[in-house]
Each structure stands twice: as C-alpha cells, then as structure tokens.
Amino acid sequence: MTIEHTGPTRHNTTGSDIRVDEEQQHLDLTYARLDRMRANTNRRLSEALRETEDNPQALSERESYERLYTDDLTKFDAAEHNLYFGRLDLEDGEIRRIGRIGILDDDEADSTLLLDWRAPLSRPFYLATPAAPESVEMRRHIRTRNRMVRAVNDEYLTGEHAVTDMSAHGDVVNESALVSALNAARTGEMTDIVETIQREQDIIIRSTHRGVTVIQGGPGTGKTAVALHRAAYLLYTHRDTLSRSGILIVGPNDDFLDYIGQVLPSLGESGVLLSTVGDLFPGVSAAATDSRETMAVKGDLRMVDVVKRTVRAYQSLPSMPVPVTFDTYEVQITSQLIKDARAKARSSRKAHNQAQRIFVRAGLDGLAQAHARTIGASLLDGSQLLSAGDIADIREEMAQDPDIRRELLRFWPTLTPLDVLRDLYADPAAIRRATPGWSDDDRAALHRVAAPRPEGADFSPADVPLLDEIAELIGFGTEDDEREQRAQWRRQLAEAQEALDILTGSAPQDLEDDLDPEILMAYDLIDAEQLAERQTRRRNLTTAERAVGDRQWAFGHVIVDEAQELSAMAWRMLMRRIPNRWMTIIGDTAQTGDLAGTRSWQAVLEPYVAKRWQLRELTVNYRTPSEITRYANRVLHQINPEHSPPTSLRSNGIEPYAMTAAGSSVPSAVVTALGGDWPGLTAIIAPDNQCAGIAAELDGRTSGGDEIRVLTVSACKGLEFDNVVVVGPAEILRQSPRGHSDLYVALTRATQRLVVVYDEPLPDELKDLPVRND
Ligand SMILES: Nc1ncnc2c1ncn2[C@@H]1O[C@H](COP(=O)(O)OP(=O)(O)OP(=O)(O)O)[C@@H](O)[C@H]1O
C-alpha cells in the first residue's frame, strides 16, 4: 500500500502515519456498524417474508416493510464503496466525519459515526475556503479502497498551518482529490462527485428556491453532475413529499441516460424516473427518426393550432341529411341538427371525448323532437299532440338504438391521439386544411406515406409532444382510462373466480363429504374479490413505475438536462407534468443543435412563469484541458461573442493536432489517425453522413480493449471520452444552420486528447492547429 499525505504528519513508534491509523480505526468502527445494520435489516426482511397473515391489510403492510427493508439494503450496498471520505476539524475542537450515508452508533449515546454528505452540518466540507473558513480549522480528505485507508490529505484553513499561498484556483476545495478524479480514465459511465463537489456547484445542489432555477454553464462545468446530486439532495431533504410524487429527470437520448444511469443508485437513490421526452407518453416508444427540418416544424408552437384544427375537423357536419329508421319511420339527421348538438358540446368546454356524451344527448333531443313533429303534429293547426313525457320516451328509445347512435357518432367520433396524428400525417388534404398560410415545404415536412402500425413504434421523439397535446384536447387518459381500469378489474375478478372454481372443482370428492375443519382450503379462506385485490397489490409499484404509466402524473420536482434542445412543444408537454413549477433546468444555449431548440431561457420560460425564475451559472470546466478549450473557445465566440467561456481547471500538456485525409478516403484516414493504442475510451465524432462509412472501416476495432465509438454530434451530447477524433469540421459546420454549436459540442467531449481529421480546408477557428501526418 502506498500512503499519500499532505499537511503536518505525525508518526507513531512503528513509523506509520498516526492520521492514517486514526482514520483506519474510525473506518473499522463504521464498517462494523454498517455490517450490523445490514444483518439486522436482513433478519427483519426474512421475518416479514415469513409472515403468513393473508388479509389484505396484513399483505399491504408486509409489502411496505418488504420495500422499506429492500431499499435500506440497496442503500447500504451503494454506500459500501468509499463510505467515509471527509472530516472537518472545527476551531472549537468539534470533529465531524462525512460519508455517503449518515450512520449512528448503537451505543448508549447514539453517537454519530458518519454524517450524510447532504446533512446541513456537512456543508462546510464543500464550502469552506481559507478566505471564508466557516469555523473550519482543517479539512481532511480520506481516500479508501476495500475498507482500507489509502491516503489522507489535510488542508488547513485557519491557524498556524493555514494555506496562505492559495492555488491558481483559489476557490477550489479538496484540490488534490479533485485533480485525481478529473485525471482518472473514463469508464463510459458517469460517476458521482460527492467527495469533491465544488462551492458553486454546492450552492445549486442545495438551493432552497421553490420555483424554476436555470443552470447555465459551458461544456464540462458539471451541469449534469449537479443535476443528479440535486435530485439526491432533494430526496434527502424532502423525502416525505418527493417519495410520493417523484422526481423526473429528462435527458436528450437513451445513450445519455445509460451514461448517467448509475450515479443516483451509487448515491443510494433508486426512485427517480429518468426519461427522454420521446418516452414520456405511455404506450409509445418513439423509435422513428425525423429530418432536422421536420423536427423543427413539429417542435414549433404553430403546431398548437394545427392540432386544434385537426381535432375540430372530426366534429364535422353532414353534407346531405342522413336518413335513419326509427319505429318504421324515416328520421333525418340534418346538418342543422348536428350543428346545434355540436354547439352545445363545444360550449361545455370539455375535452372532445368527454364532450361526446353531451353531443349525443343533444343530437337525440333534436331527433326525438323531429320525429315528434312528424308523427305528433295536429293536422288541423300543426300543434304538437304528444306530451313532453311521450317525447322523452321516444328519446329514450332512440338512445337504445345502436344504428342511431352509430350515425350520430360519425360526426363526433371517439378519438385516440395515435390515430389522430397518423391520419393527419397520411393525408395531404388534411394537412393543408390544418395549416392555413404555411409554406409547401413546411407542409411537406409533416406528410408521410402511411406507415405500418406496430403499436406505438411509428412515432418519433418530436411526435410525442404532439400526441400529448392531442391527448389534452380529447381528454385521453382521463375518464377513459378509469373506465378501462374498471374493465380490467372486472376481467381480473372473473379470472380470479375462474381460478377458484377450478380449485373447488378439483377438490378431492371424499373431502367434500367428510371435510376436516382443520384442513384449510384456499376456497374457504378467500373469495374472488380478495384474490383479485391481492393480485393488484402484489404489483407493488414504485413511484417511478406508477408515474411512467400515467400521462397525468404530477411530479414533485422535474430536472431537465440538455434543456436547450427541447422544442417549444416539448416544453408545453413537460410543464403539464409539473403543475407546481418546481424545476431545475440545466443547459447551455451555446450548445443548441436542434433547430427547434432554444437560444434564450427567457423566451422559453416566459409563457409559464413570466419572469419568476432564477439563473445560476457554472463557470469552471472540469472536463476539457486548456490545450483543447483554446480552440473550442474561438468557436464559442462565433456563436455568441458575449458568451464568456468557462475556465479550464487543468492543463495536461497534450496538444491537439490535425491530420489531413488528402490522398486517402476519410474512413481510412480516421483509422490512420487512431495510431497506436491511446489509454482510455476513444470516440470518433463525424458528420451524420460519414458515420456509417467510418464504422465499417473500423470493423469492430478496439482501443485498449474498449470499443471505439462512432457518433454523430447529436448522439454525443452530454457524453465524454478520454480521446476524441473530430472528423470533417467544415462539413459539421455546413450540415446545419446551427453548425457552430455542433462543432463546439464535438470539440469539447475530450478529457485528454483531441485529433481533427479533415479533407477540405479547416475552418478559421482551427486553422492554426499543428498538422501531423505520420
Ligand atoms: N466537483 C467535481 N468533482 C469531480 N468531477 C467533477 C466535478 N464537477 C464535474 N466533474 C466532472 O466533470 C465532467 C463534466 O461534468 P458534466 O458532464 O456534468 O458537465 P456538463 O456541464 O453537463 O457538460 P456538457 O454541457 O458537455 O454536457 C464529468 O466527468 C464530471 O464527473
């Protein structure tokens, strides 16, 4: 074992560092307690599972205990690695020890072995600096592995050992731990940063603001890390409310969600729903893709009116009277009759499907009156001979007539969002009617040749907010859903009854006659209703699982990452999921690549919260070394000269360079550029139309045993790699009106090394890259 340490060292008689011995002792105590907690919880879990009470209340209690104990065990397992990492020695002699979870000893005094990193008392660990020591004399960073202390770093903030010569980054806390975390090779999965959260990040993570907070920051400033730690912090601080309503984190694509997916579980939090916008509509997995232009059109706010007109078009009028037969007479469904019924239904202001009942009722009233006029009018003076009761009877009879009902419903049909959108896209005439004043190009962007209809898979992420908008207008997933749930319950009940019948039927006959009261038979103990209820409870859904299946779920807090990419229509959908508007919005308007995405937070938020939102900025780039940001910042200047670039925290001495593809194909030039094995993960970021060719040329080649990934710019959003090869920067600039943002994103993915491969002149910002062709 190598022991690293800084700060004044004290040795014991065997020559080892007393501080390490001291921390090892505490670590042993803490792990021993963790092991006891684990054993106790395991015992309680087994007891709960052995519980045989079978009434619904006991079952439900047992299930909540099961969940509680299982959650605790997951938390203990998550805390195992680097359980204890920080210590504060205060000026008044108090010592605080900080770890991944809070642990109390089981001694008489319940003394605190570890404070949770999220507890208020832990906060100075992240905030105190020599300039603002917050009563901290010394901050100790303890590095452990496999329950052994590996290194101890002390930082004196006050007193005789205080650091007076502050580092170049005077605000950096836990600098040596931070630098080693930043230099570590990437694994392809994001890791938590609890040991090295920085001051400006901590302020956001623990913000008490109850409205909308926007976190703007350049690439690599830790926006995603902050978002995830904020979720963990909020769950710790508001566990009661948020464990019931849930936290939703929205990210740009599945690769990104996979990349960040381990961070919250490693912090012991598993109840957070991570989703893309494309997955937020129950039953739809948005697998189709759209061109950039189509995405821009679908994401534009003009679609609100398109969708409204489309739904209203189903509330149609007959061009000719429609004859129906009632009681051997012919009755006409006229345009006027439908118009009156439609006016009544529309004036109810209910959603389309819910207003259908009003429409049908009004239609039946009109038809009954019309029929009464035919059969009940006096031949003398035309006065009505039928009483109001007679007419009501006619109406009642008509209501039972399936043909009449069906004919009326043609003019106010039951709708589903999926069919409405499919039918719109498939019909150029319907698109034209719904888009007055639009250009032919924009209309063409909506049209698609009727697709096969695998359940929900023919939609793209840009369609999902439109489906949601339609669902709102037609009231889908509200009363209809409840009705469906009731039907499901009835089916379940029938199945349970069937199961009991089989059980009863298969009971041995001799027992029938001579039933031993001691033998407990299933059919004696439980009726069908109880059985069905038990099955329902057994599903034992977590908050996240329930939320994902419910379009109308109101989350307690929503965090949106890479929020600059969301279209105006996507914002409308998200805002429906968070009526209390308690949100953390994270992004960088300089990185906006989506043509429907945003360049201005104010423009996005104005319709929902006016000016009531606060902006926080992150200013330090933890990912990209200064050798690379030098070039990336020039691209940023092209995007917006007023955007101040984040400061790179480190320099690694590896100069970026360019390689020309002249004389060979781009894919083979890329393979040449990869040269020997670079340590760590490698990615190639290329223009959309070149990725397939490069992947084919690579033919599964690896670097240092890891797959080399080939990505478009939009797919690499939010990700990072040790080594990055950016291909065709001029083509990246050209392929989108937001080309500079795309190039900026591509250039800022590397933590160590950047190589640019080009086959046409380099853009001005990269012109002075050293060229190497070896
Ligand atoms: N305080 C910290 N301690 C250790 N590592 C950190 C810290 N803050 C950020 N990092 C690391 O810096 C890298 C960049 O962080 P992150 O991906 O959150 O940045 P970002 O602002 O979301 O970037 P982008 O805008 O490019 O998506 C990650 O590897 C993250 O773990």
Image (tube, rainbow, N blue to C red):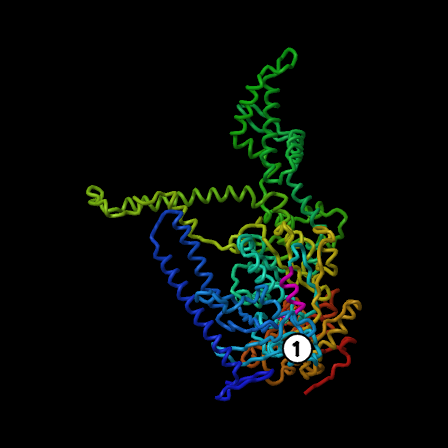
Q: Residue at x 65, y 60 (%)?
A: 207
Circle 1: residue type: Val
* Vertical relation: 90 (above or below) 278: below
* Vertical relation: 674 (above or below) 73: below
Q: Would residue 221 appear left or right of 281 to someone viewing this image? A: right
Residue stretch in magenta: 197-207
Label 1 crowd (10 A; few <14 / some 14-19 / many >=20) = many
The percent coordinates of residue 367 (x first, y second) are 60, 26
Q: Would residue 689 appear left or right of 61 to someone viewing this image? A: right
Residue 190 visible (yes or no)? no
**Residue 710, located in which quarter of the rendered image?**
bottom right
- In this view of the protein, which residue sits in the foreground, 275 or 153? 153
- In this view of the protein, which residue sits in the foreground, 502 or 258? 258
Q: Which residue is mark 1?
A: 725
Q: Residue at x 41, y 68 (%)?
A: 36
User: Quick one: SS at disc 1?
Assistant: strand
The percent coordinates of residue 556 (x first, y second) are 59, 53
Considering every residue shown, the one lying at the far top of the view is 380
What predominant SS class does the magenta segment belong to?
helix
**Figure disc tally:** 1
Q: Would residue 752 appear left or right of 547 to someone viewing this image? A: right
The percent coordinates of residue 515 (x first, y second) are 22, 43
Q: Quadrant of the C terminus?
A: bottom right
**Residue 289, located in which quarter of the rendered image?**
bottom right
Residue 673 visible (yes or no)? yes
Q: Residue at x 43, y 67 (%)?
A: 107
Q: Would residue 700 appear left or right of 575 to someone viewing this image? A: left
Where does ligand 1 appear, by image quarter?
bottom right
The percent coordinates of residue 495 (x first, y second) are 38, 45
333 inside magenta stretch: no
